[in-house]
Image (tube, rainbow, N blue to C red):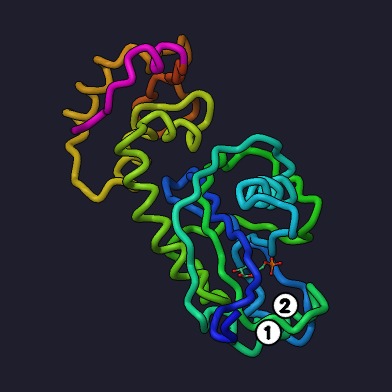
């Protein structure tokens, strides 16, 4: 075989989105625990090299489980990142050497998107530090992880346009229309008038009003709603075309 063909490692990286109480999109970052790397360069996307007998999708599921303790999470493979130089920063080489006891200088990574309710208990079996970061407070990250995150944003927008029901993976089980509006606005780049949004939403029978309203709020208390997946599957309409 020509020596120009690569023998390379393959990894997965997961961008897990959450939506916080201040109506901001967040993502989960983990911390590398290695003294030789400066503190401010230790945060990264959760990821792993894949095992020789493992499918990439299975590796992504494993990473998410090791990250959150949750068995089944919504998961979407969206892109492969294969720049030959993506893993040759000296800190990243040090990290890979410590973590895998190998000199690794080329890794192709397959990136995944996932969604998690931010109030879900994170019970990591692998990482000591797992934290939510608002998307505009994400620090400079190792490898090409900042690039992966910015491409994942484009992807999550497309995903919501093609399957609106995934938005409910990010909302609490009961939510107000304002929360739904704020999440939809944070995700889509278009301006949407709140009154029109309310009108559209009230025509969707899969968004079901509950007999509960907000308590202890300074504004007019809003009603809570829930998403009914069964009704949604029957209609499967897009929210806004
Ligand atoms: O074991 P760790 O370092 O978490 O994962 C392997 C890393 O290797 C790189 O391709 C990835 O970007 C990934 O983050």
Quote the CA–CA distance across marks 1 and 2: 5 Å
Q: In the shown orientation, is residue 176 left or right of residue 43?
A: left
In the image, the segment drawn in magenta is 230-241
Quarter occupied by the C terminus: top left
The residue labelled by disc 2 is: 96
Instruction: Answer few, some or many: residues within 10 Å of disc 1's Cα (few below 14, many 20 plus, some between 14 and 19).
Output: some
- Seen from this angle, which residue lies furthest bottom? 90
Q: Are marks 1 and 2 in contact (CB under 8 Å)?
A: yes
Residue 107 at x, y = what percent? 60, 73
Residue 132 at x, y = what percent? 58, 55
Q: Nearer the viewer, residue 57 or 222?
A: 57
Check residue 201 in the rendering and tell me which mark sits there, or answer none: none
Is residue 237 inside the magenta stretch? yes
Check residue 93 in the rendering and tell me which mark sits there, or answer none: 1
Q: In the shown orientation, is residue 101 left or right of residue 231?
A: right
Regarding mark 1 in the picture, which secondary structure is present there? helix
Q: Is mark 2 within 8 Å of ligand 1?
A: yes
**Residue in the image at 40% along x and 63% along y:** 150
Q: In the shown orientation, is residue 41 left or right of residue 113?
A: right
**Residue in the image at 48% along x and 44% along y:** 19
Above or below for 215 versus 59: above
Q: Quadrant of residue 218?
A: top left
Above or below for 236 versus 41: above
Residue 167 at x, y = what percent? 42, 35
């Amino acid at each position: 075989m020509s020596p120009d063909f690569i023998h390379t490692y393959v990894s997965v990286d997961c961008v897990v989105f959450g939506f916080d109480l201040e109506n901001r999109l967040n993502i989960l970052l983990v911390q590398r625990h290695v003294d030789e790397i400066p503190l401010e360069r230790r945060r990264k996307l959760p990821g792993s090299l894949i095992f020789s007998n493992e499918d990439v999708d299975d590796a992504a599921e494993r990473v998410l489980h090791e990250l959150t303790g949750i068995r089944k999470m919504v998961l979407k493979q969206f892109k492969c990142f294969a720049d030959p130089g993506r893993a040759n920063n000296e800190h990243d080489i040090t990290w890979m050497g410590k973590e895998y006891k190998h000199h690794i200088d080329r890794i192709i990574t397959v990136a995944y998107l996932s969604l998690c309710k931010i109030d879900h208990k994170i019970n990591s079996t692998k990482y000591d530090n797992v934290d939510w970061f608002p998307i505009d407070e994400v620090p400079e990250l190792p490898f090409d992880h900042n690039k992966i995150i910015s491409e994942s944003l484009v992807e999550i927008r497309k995903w919501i346009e093609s399957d609106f029901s995934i938005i409910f993976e990010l909302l609490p089980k009961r939510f107000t229309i304002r929360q739904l509006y704020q999440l939809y606005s944070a995700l889509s780049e278009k301006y949407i008038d709140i009154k029109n949004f309310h009108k559209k939403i009230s025509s969707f029978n899969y968004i079901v009003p509950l007999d509960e309203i907000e308590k202890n709020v300074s504004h007019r208390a809003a009603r809570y709603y829930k998403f009914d997946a069964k009704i949604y599957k029957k209609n499967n309409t897009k929210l806004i075309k």
